[in-house]
């Protein structure tokens, strides 16, 4: 269990958890050491502490713009639309720290994908593999039974959900390239292969010295493409991702200003990091440069595609957690919040990004101590649900992804560690309170990537 009063312990546990989680979930980005090195040079740093199902302070800055009606081609991004206004029909409601009266409003329409049959709850916040979880009826909060934590079942459920948000690469073992993580993606007859250094190893001196000559001084590995001629993708990249549907390939790369490899050490000169998007099935066709930022302003990670592959999110740790999401089809930016609020992910979003549906996302906004959950369909004409959270502490919030069809009909759980209370919500229907429950989830308890 993580001690909430010992931030240094959190950091140590989180670092070890990341090492295990990254190896199991997905390869670490090639510029992980770069980001750690940069963080020590910048004035602002963001600590990520994952404890049980704790909300993770992740910022998402997405910079993708595609156009054209042909799904196989990358189109121009000429305009950026400001959609920061609240859509018509937005549902707004409020949660008190301890709910004594239930608020009622319009009952959501029946879900097209059903409703959760059970909530898994625990009086503690740790995913203790020897622990017992309660089986809770989401309609009235009654306990219908108990069962032991099942780490394998919990992990299987999370793995299945993660696979909805991005293509999962092969991870071939290559004894000729020790000290790095090799990843391989296949789209039709095109194969992409690259390697990255383990991001949990934050010291260059601690990396495998045999791997360092294979990376340039900006920490980039080679991107090898086979099955296509005259590939237009960069020769070296720091990160890449392909949507689960195989339509779009997105890469982060830089033209490193200094020659040499990591054997010589990292460049001390500033350089620009570029985000580009390509047709994954046709890497010989020119891609689109979406944004170019100096690394001092873009400590970025590719965060994943929406379920329908149309939207992309990028997370950044600069100037506090922030969101920018772009529509790949229309080439327009979707404004999530224009008030300068800190924007935190909901539970599990650190694993598969902010996405909770085909084109919907969920984010926790915090402005001057006021907290608000926003669940929004970012597709044109999509709806939005806003919930004021007035708990005394920063709550954890989990969206039911398995039974999500639209924001207005979302099932979600809010938990306050300070009051050892959770609440079950369905849209803006009356709230079901779970006193004495510190952790509640739509996913079986027992395993948590990252902590």
Image: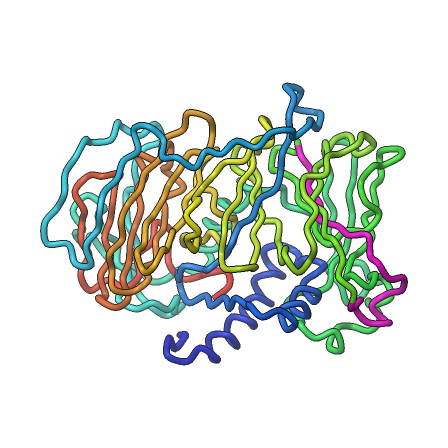
Q: Position of residue 144 (x, y in %)?
A: 20, 52
Residue sitting at 19 percent across and 39 percent down? 429
Kindly indicate the quadrant of the structure image that contains residue 288. top right
Location of residue 28 in the rendering, given as x and y in whole percent from the top left corner: 66, 59
Q: Is residue 412 magenta?
A: no
- 90 sits left or right of 237 in the view: left
Give residue 219's position: percent from left, percent from top.
77, 62
Looking at the image, which residue sits at the far left?
101
Is residue 310 visible to the viewer in this orientation of the structure?
A: no
Magenta highlight on residue 264:
yes
Quarter of the image holding residue 279? top right
303 lies left or right of 179:
left
Q: Position of residue 368 (x, y in %)?
A: 34, 59
Q: What span is colored magenta in the figure?
A: 248-268
Asked whether 241 or 245 is in front, the reply is 241
Quick check: 124 left or right of 221? left
Q: On screen, 241 above or below 213?
A: above
State the quadrant of the N terminus: bottom left
Q: Is residue 339 visible?
A: yes
Residue at image point 36% right, 31% down: 87
Left or right of 320, for residue 118? left
At horizontal 23% and vertical 53% (from top left) the residue drawn is 423
**Considering only vertical position in the picture, is 440 above or below 377?**
below
């Amino acid at each position: 269990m993580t001690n909430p009063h010992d931030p240094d312990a959190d950091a140590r546990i989180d670092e070890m958890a990341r090492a295990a989680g990254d190896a199991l979930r997905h390869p670490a980005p090639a510029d992980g050491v770069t980001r750690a090195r940069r963080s020590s040079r910048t004035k602002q740093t963001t600590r990520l502490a994952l404890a049980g199902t704790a909300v993770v302070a992740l910022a998402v800055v997405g910079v993708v713009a595609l156009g054209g009606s042909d799904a196989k081609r990358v189109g121009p991004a000429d305009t950026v639309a400001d959609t920061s206004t609240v859509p018509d029909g937005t549902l707004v409601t409020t949660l008190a720290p301890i709910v004594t009266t239930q608020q009622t409003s319009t009952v959501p329409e029946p879900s097209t994908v059903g409703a959760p049959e059970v909530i898994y709850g625990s009086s503690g916040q740790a995913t203790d593999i020897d622990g017992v979880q309660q089986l809770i009826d989401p309609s009235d909060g009654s306990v219908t039974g108990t069962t032991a934590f099942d780490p394998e079942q919990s992990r299987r459920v999370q793995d299945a959900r993660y696979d909805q948000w991005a293509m999962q690469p092969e991870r071939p073992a290559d004894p000729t390239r020790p000290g790095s993580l090799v990843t391989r993606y296949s789209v039709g007859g095109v194969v992409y292969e690259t390697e990255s250094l383990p991001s949990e190893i934050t010291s260059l001196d601690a990396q495998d010295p045999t791997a360092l000559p294979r990376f340039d001084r900006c920490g980039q590995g080679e991107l090898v493409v086979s099955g296509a001629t005259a590939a237009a993708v960069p020769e070296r990249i720091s990160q890449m991702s392909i949507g689960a549907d195989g339509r779009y390939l997105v890469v982060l790369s830089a033209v490193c200003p200094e020659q040499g490899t990591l054997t010589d050490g990292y460049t001390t000169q500033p350089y620009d990091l570029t985000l580009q998007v390509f047709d994954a099935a046709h890497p010989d066709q020119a891609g689109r440069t979406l944004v170019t930022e100096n690394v001092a302003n873009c400590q970025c990670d590719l965060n994943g595609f929406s379920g329908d592959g149309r939207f992309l999110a990028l997370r950044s740790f600069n100037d506090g957690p922030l969101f920018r999401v772009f529509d790949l089809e229309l080439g327009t930016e979707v404004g999530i919040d224009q008030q300068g609020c800190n924007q935190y992910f909901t539970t599990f979003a650190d694993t598969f990004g902010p996405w909770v549906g085909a084109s919907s996302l969920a984010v926790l906004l915090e402005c001057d101590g006021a907290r608000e959950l926003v669940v929004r369909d970012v597709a044109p004409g999509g709806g939005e649900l806003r919930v004021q959270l007035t708990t005394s502490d920063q709550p954890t919030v989990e969206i039911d992804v398995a039974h999500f069809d639209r924001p207005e009909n979302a099932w979600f759980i809010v938990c306050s560690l300070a009051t050892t209370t959770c609440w079950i919500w369905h849209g803006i229907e009356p709230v079901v309170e779970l006193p004495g429950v510190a952790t509640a989830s739509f996913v079986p308890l027992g395993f948590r990537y990252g902590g």
